[in-house]
Image (cartoon, rainbow, N blue to C red):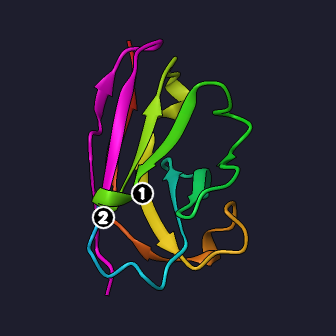
Amino acid sequence: QVQLVESGGGSQQPGGSLRLSCAASDDTYSLNCMGWFRQAPGKKREGVAGVYTGGGVPYYADSVKGRFTISQDNAKNTVYLQMNSLKPDDTAMYYCAAGACVRLDADDEFTRWGQGTQVTVAS
């Protein structure tokens, strides 16, 4: 079973940057997508960004377009989320996920989830 391990969270001031990493175990042959989701206290989980491991147009939530970039290193089974121009509204627990997806913005398409990494944006 695929295991996902996130890293790179932390605290940052508004306007700053953070990069999250998600390393997947080797047995990812049955999965075709990886993505990032986030959940803030009292709010629903939302899709942030997603990518098909075979390439194609990535998905970004409107709230992060132009600020966040998802990328992948297939040789390392790793996906990254570069977060720039951070805002306090970006504060949340960020989860890496993988699955056999048709859509990249639907969390029920993702069947493997990491433990999450906290991102806090505050002055």
Disc 1/disc 2 C-alpha distance (Å)? 7 Å
Is residue 30 among the parts visible in the rendering? yes
Image point (63%, 33%), residue name: 64
Task: Give the mark count.
Answer: 2
Residue 66 location in percent, x, y?
66, 25
Residue 12 magenta-highlighted? yes
Locate residue 62, reporting x and y percent.
Answer: 74, 37
Measured from the top left, where is residue 79 in percent x and y?
40, 52
Residue, disc 1:
95
At mark 1, the secondary structure is strand
Task: Examine the rendered structure and indicate whether residue 95 appears above or below residue 107.
Answer: above
Q: Categorize mark 1 by other alpha carbons within 10 Å: few (<14), some (14-19), many (20+).
A: many
Is residue 11 a member of the stretch shown in magenta? yes
Question: Which quarter of the figure is the C terminus placed in?
Answer: top left
Q: Looking at the image, can residue 45 be seen?
A: no
38 w.r.t. 20: above or below = below
Which quarter shows the N terminus? bottom left
Helix, strand or loop status at disc 2: loop
- Are circles 1 and 2 on residues that touch, CB within 8 Å? yes
Specify which label sits upstream in the sequence, 1 or 2: 1
Residue at horizontal 36 percent and vertical 28 percent from the top: 18
Q: Which residue is mark 2?
A: 115
Tell me the amino acid under the disc marked 1: Tyr
Q: Is residue 71 above or below residue 30?
A: above
Residue interval drawn in magenta: 1-22
* In this rendering, position of residue 4 left or right of residue 103: left
Question: Where residue 90 appears, x then y in whole percent?
Answer: 52, 33
Residue flagged by tag 2: what amino acid is it? Gln
Instruction: Specify the label residue 28 is tagged with.
Output: none
Residue found at x 44% / y 41%: 81
Taking depth in this image into account, of 73 and 15 the one nearest to the observer is 73
- Answer few, some or many: residues within 10 Å of disc 2's Cα (few below 14, many 20 plus, some between 14 and 19): some
